Image: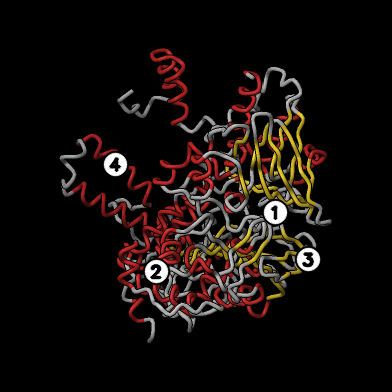
């Protein structure tokens, strides 16, 4: 089971930070309480790629799966982003990825409207997805960020 | 007032006493504590008195915040123009019904094929009594309100990890949870475990209240009987004639109730914004947009994408693109009230100082996903006696909400088949709209077996793919409030912001309205002083 190491990390505490942020908004105060309380507590079999396992954390076991089931929602499956009233930046061929620490910081802290999705990932998951993006979609950076790098930047 | 009122005293007696002894302020405070005053900051229609002497305001965004501001400013004598990105007004106050088309970021287009009368509100879907501002504008613009069933005791609580995945009626879980807690507390009182915290006189009152609250029997036990069945439901309900005698049901034991985790769903229903009475606009949330449109539509320029907001000592200049013709245009005014969501505004060139600029770029937007599913018939009503309300589940769909209109209709019905939060919302959003619908259907069929055979069609809105908001609404934390909130709301030169993101009622239309009223009140003072 490829995602066993992430499953072991599910704790109530891990879910609380994310949910506290959501609960700070009134619209979902009730829903977040209920959804958080109901869904973040249970771990389900989920999809083969690690999606739909639990509500309080991402359970995707590698960078490719994390990209496809989380990041692609905004940056799109081809990583080319999109433009309308505003835009989602393309990660494909993006020179801002040259220094690995930059995308790590964005994933951990968020930027503009982007939520700090790294709060719902382990250090290893953050490193995996950053490494995946930096070595795919026309990006060819050979150096890797590590879980320790992520931990230092959290 | 530090003493609690004694029981025989009526509320009117108490208010009268406070009024005599402590004056109007205490009276108001006391009334608020009884919930008789408005809960949001809305205190009745705004009065912008004094002549703005021809001052002009450019409003950006024709959602409820922008339209509220435009309506009130024009009434006060301002020259107002509104720029709106979409080809309609209303923003997130939005409804999808049969015949509608929706294209999300990435290009996927959905054609909604719901039967006439059926709809889904992808954004806001409820109006609490507390939200006096929105209720005011609904009355003003003739928007009809009807009850929204927030908490239906006959709907389900569902966990994949409890009762073998079999959904439980809300009323049974709540009755058994309250019942067992009451019995335990009564036991503690009788064992003198609370003697240091509760006086003997209060203990007698407490025991009596626990009997009432928990449906306990004469011995203060929560057991099978008419008292508990009157809350949790009957094995065989009462009737008339020879089959009349009711048979009480057997309560769940406390261990089962606690370990099911289903009690977790009760707290959310106690929140003020979910308390009865709670409303929805008849026919869909976009009734509000249509109501405002009648009053402000003449000021709104649709299909206008703002690309830059500039200002100097004399006025503001907004550059925008006509999304139909591609023409680059500019609009000028003395002031700008910007109601564009921060997720979009943070990507537009805005000429403001560092403190507001930093606030604009620092607030993330919540993920969220809603799926509307249409079925051949209202099986939830016909087979399961669920009329409106919400089933809560630990499945990725989060909940199923049944329509609070058209009860008893024989034709197709539409329910909210998913309102996903957290990780699930992101994961759902990466799927194609058709896949989201199929997954919502598969998850929901664990609760309603009729799903697969009765399904007709569905629509799915992942809010991070919505082209004009890129997310549901602003996520504030205590830290970001402390650092950025006041800066976000302060006027910067000739520019100021409004919207749910500039409120403490985030994600609700009332936040947009109270924010707009607060902003134009300050703007007006500035204009009168200049």
Mark before the other along the chain sequence, 4 or 3: 3
Q: Calculate the distance from the C-alpha at mark 2 to the C-alpha at mark 3.
A: 42 Å
Evaluate whether label 4 is on the same chain as label 2: no
| SS assignment at label 3 | loop
Q: Calculate the distance from the C-alpha at mark 4 to the C-alpha at mark 2.
A: 47 Å
- Number of numbered discs present? 4
Mark before the other along the chain sequence, 3 or 1: 1
Chain ID of residue with mark 4: B
Specify few, some or many for label 3: CA neighbours under 10 Å numbering under 14, 14-19, or 20 or more.
Answer: some
Residue at which label 1 appears: B94
Residue at which label 3 appears: B115
Q: Calculate the distance from the C-alpha at mark 3 to the C-alpha at mark 1.
A: 18 Å
Evaluate whether label 4 is on the same chain as label 3: yes
Q: Residue B39 or B150: which is nearer the viewer? A: B39
- Label of residue B206 in the image: 4
| SS assignment at label 1 | loop
Percent across and percent down for residue B329 are 78, 47
Percent across and percent down for residue B62 are 71, 45
Q: Where is the N terminus of chain B found, in terms of image quarters?
A: top left
Q: Calculate the distance from the C-alpha at mark 4 to the C-alpha at mark 1.
A: 48 Å
Chain ID of residue with mark 3: B
């Amino acid at each position: 089971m490829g995602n066993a190491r992430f499953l072991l990390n599910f704790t109530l505490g891990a879910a609380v930070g994310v949910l506290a942020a959501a609960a700070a908004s009134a619209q979902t105060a009730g829903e977040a309480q209920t959804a958080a309380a109901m869904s973040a507590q249970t771990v389900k079999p989920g999809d083969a790629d690690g999606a739909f396992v639990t509500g309080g954390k991402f359970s995707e076991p590698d960078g490719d799966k994390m990209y496809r089931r989380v990041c692609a929602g905004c940056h799109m499956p081809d990583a080319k982003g999109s433009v309308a009233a505003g835009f989602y930046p393309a990660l494909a061929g993006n020179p801002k990825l040259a220094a690995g620490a930059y995308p790590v910081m964005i994933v951990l802290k968020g930027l503009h409207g982007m939520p700090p999705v790294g709060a719902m990932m382990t250090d290893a998951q953050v490193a995996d997805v950053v490494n995946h993006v930096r070595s795919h979609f026309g990006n060819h950076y050979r150096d890797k960020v590590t879980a320790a790098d992520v931990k230092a930047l959290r | 007032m530090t003493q609690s009122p004694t029981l025989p005293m009526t509320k009117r007696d108490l208010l009268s006493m406070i009024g005599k002894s402590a004056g109007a302020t205490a009276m108001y405070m006391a009334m608020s504590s009884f919930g008789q005053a408005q809960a949001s900051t809305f205190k009745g229609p705004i009065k912008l008195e004094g002549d703005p002497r021809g001052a002009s305001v450019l409003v950006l965004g024709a959602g409820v915040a922008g339209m509220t501001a435009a309506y009130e400013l024009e009434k006060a004598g301002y020259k107002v123009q509104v720029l709106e990105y979409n080809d309609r007004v209303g923003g997130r106050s939005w409804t999808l019904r049969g015949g509608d088309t929706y294209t999300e970021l990435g290009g996927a287009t959905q054609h909604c094929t719901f039967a006439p009368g059926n709809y889904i509100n992808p954004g806001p879907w409820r109006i609490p009594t507390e939200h006096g501002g929105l209720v005011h504008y609904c009355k003003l613009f003739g928007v009809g309100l009807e009850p929204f069933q927030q908490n239906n005791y006959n709907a389900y609580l569902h966990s994949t990890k409890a009762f073998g995945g079999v959904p439980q009626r809300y009323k049974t879980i709540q009755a058994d949870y309250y019942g067992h807690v009451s019995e335990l507390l009564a036991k503690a009182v009788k064992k003198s475990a609370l003697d240091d915290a509760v006086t003997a006189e209060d203990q007698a009152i407490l025991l009596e209240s626990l009997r009432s609250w928990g449906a306990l029997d004469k011995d203060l036990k929560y057991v099978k009987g008419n008292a508990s069945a009157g809350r949790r439901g009957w094995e065989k309900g009462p009737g008339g004639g020879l089959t009349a005698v009711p048979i009480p049901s057997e309560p769940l034991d406390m261990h089962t109730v606690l370990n099911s985790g289903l009690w977790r769903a009760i707290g959310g229903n106690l929140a003020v914004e979910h308390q009865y009475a709670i409303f929805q606009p008849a026919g869909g949330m976009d009734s509000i947009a249509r109501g405002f449109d009648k009053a402000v539509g003449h000021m709104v320029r649709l299909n206008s994408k703002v690309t830059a907001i500039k200002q100097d000592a004399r006025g503001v200049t907004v550059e925008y693109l006509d999304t139909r013709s591609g023409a680059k245009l500019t609009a000028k005014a003395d002031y700008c009230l910007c109601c564009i969501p921060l997720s979009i505004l943070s990507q537009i060139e805005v000429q403001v100082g560092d403190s507001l600029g930093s606030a604009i770029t620092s607030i993330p937007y919540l993920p969220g996903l809603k799926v509307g599913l249409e079925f051949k018939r209202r099986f939830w009503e016909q087979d399961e006696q669920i009329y409106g309300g919400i089933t809560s589940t630990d499945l990725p769909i989060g909940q199923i909400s049944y329509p609070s209109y058209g009860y008893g209709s024989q034709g197709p019905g539409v329910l909210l088949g998913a309102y996903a939060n957290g990780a699930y919302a992101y994961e759902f959003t990466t799927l194609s709209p058709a896949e989201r619908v199929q997954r919502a259907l598969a998850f929901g069929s664990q609760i309603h077996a009729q799903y697969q055979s009765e399904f007709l069609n569905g629509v799915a809105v992942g809010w991070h793919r919505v082209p004009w908001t890129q997310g549901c609404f602003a996520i504030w934390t205590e830290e970001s409030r402390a650092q950025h909130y006041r800066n976000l709301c302060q006027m910067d030169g000739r520019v100021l912001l409004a919207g749910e993101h500039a409120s403490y009622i985030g994600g609700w239309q009332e936040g947009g309205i109270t924010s707009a009223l607060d902003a134009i009140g300050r703007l007006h003072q500035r204009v009168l002083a200049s």
